[in-house]
Image (cartoon, rainbow, N blue to C red):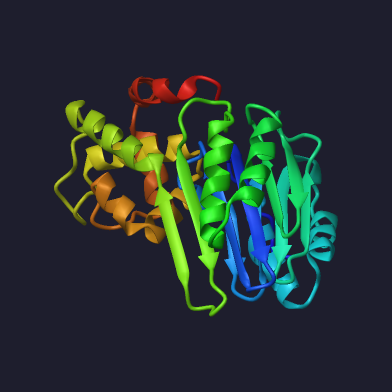
Amino acid sequence: MTPQSHVLRPSTFSIVASEFENGDLGVAVQSKFPAVGAVVPWAKARVGAIATQAWCNTAYGPSGLKMLEANLSAQETLRKLLADDTNPQVRQFAIVDAKGQVAAHTGTECFEWAGHITGKGYSCQGNILAGARVVESMARAYEETSGDLIDKLIQALSAGQAAGGDRREGRGDRDWRRYERDWRGYERYRRDEVNLFLSKARSLAESSPAPWTPQKRGQPPYPPKAMVTLLLLKTWLGMDYRSISAYLRAFPEQRIKVGLEETPSHTTIRNHMLRIPETYLRRLNTQLTKPYQKGA
């Protein structure tokens, strides 16, 4: 199994589903955690779909798909992933294979309310939810909705939200993916709260005094206020220096919104962090995170 990679818990509800009769499979997720589509949902045509959440082990995604591709069943894959994990009690994940077989796990130390419901070809799961009614409503909506698989996935998310969803205020990010039976169709939609946060963070950084004056020698310096915006984003996402640098490389549109022409290395980001007075960042963080603190 690949080395474990842990990120801040994406307090989440999700659904994985497969319609064996026509070959469709998909995964849908909604979370207060920003950019959740880069963390929770994993799927591969003709193979299966996985949602990994709570204290998320992102290695479950690629490793699980490889096991499914090697003809392990959803249940066999789940057992192997748990056996290789030193902290299964904080994990929550679900697997559906191309045959419609389902397996799910909610660790005993996942934050309440946490749980899952499985049915024919699907599994609904979530953590830090308003209650069991969230996944129960998702399952009912999935079973009662007619039409294409993606319609069922969307209705399941909407039903979960209507039932209370994440027990913190605000919906956050949503991501859903469908792999069609001809294995060429691919649909992805996402709504990131991170875009709103970035807009506010950059506006606040631009209206505040720069924490240092760039020196006019050597390589062109990174703009101080852009680096402040980046560090605010890093703190909000709960990422370390390597992760935030990798995030900007993976999502160049976010780098542009930060105000950077190039992606700084993790060492450069760390060095800039050390240059900024702690009180300066604390003041800005306090102003930015007030809307997100309740129930966090």
Q: Quadrant of residue 22?
A: bottom right
Residue 283 is left or right of residue 217, and the answer is right
- Taking depth in this image into account, of 153 and 130 the one nearest to the observer is 153
- Residue 49 visible, this orientation: no
Q: What residue appears at the point 19 percent right and 54 percent down from the top-left corner?
A: 220
- Taking depth in this image into account, of 6 and 121 the one nearest to the observer is 121
Residue 212 appears at what percent x and percent y?
23, 33
Furthest residue toward left: 216
Q: How many marks?
A: 0
Q: What residue appears at the point 63 percent right and 31 percent down from the top-left corner?
A: 129
- Taking depth in this image into account, of 73 and 138 the one nearest to the observer is 138
Residue 203 is left or right of residue 13, and the answer is left
Q: Quadrant of the C terminus?
A: top right
Q: What residue appears at the point 55 percent right and 44 percent down from the top-left corner?
A: 157
Q: Quadrant of the N terminus?
A: bottom right
Q: What residue appears at the point 59 percent right and 62 percent down from the top-left corner?
A: 26
- Taking depth in this image into account, of 113 and 260 the one nearest to the observer is 113
Residue 99 is left or right of residue 83, and the answer is left
Residue 224 appears at what percent x and percent y?
24, 39
- Residue 146 visible, this orientation: yes
Whether residue 72 is situated above or below residue 211 in the rendered picture: below
Residue 64 appears at what percent x and percent y?
71, 65
Residue 133 is left or right of residue 229, and the answer is right
Residue 101 appears at what percent x and percent y?
78, 64
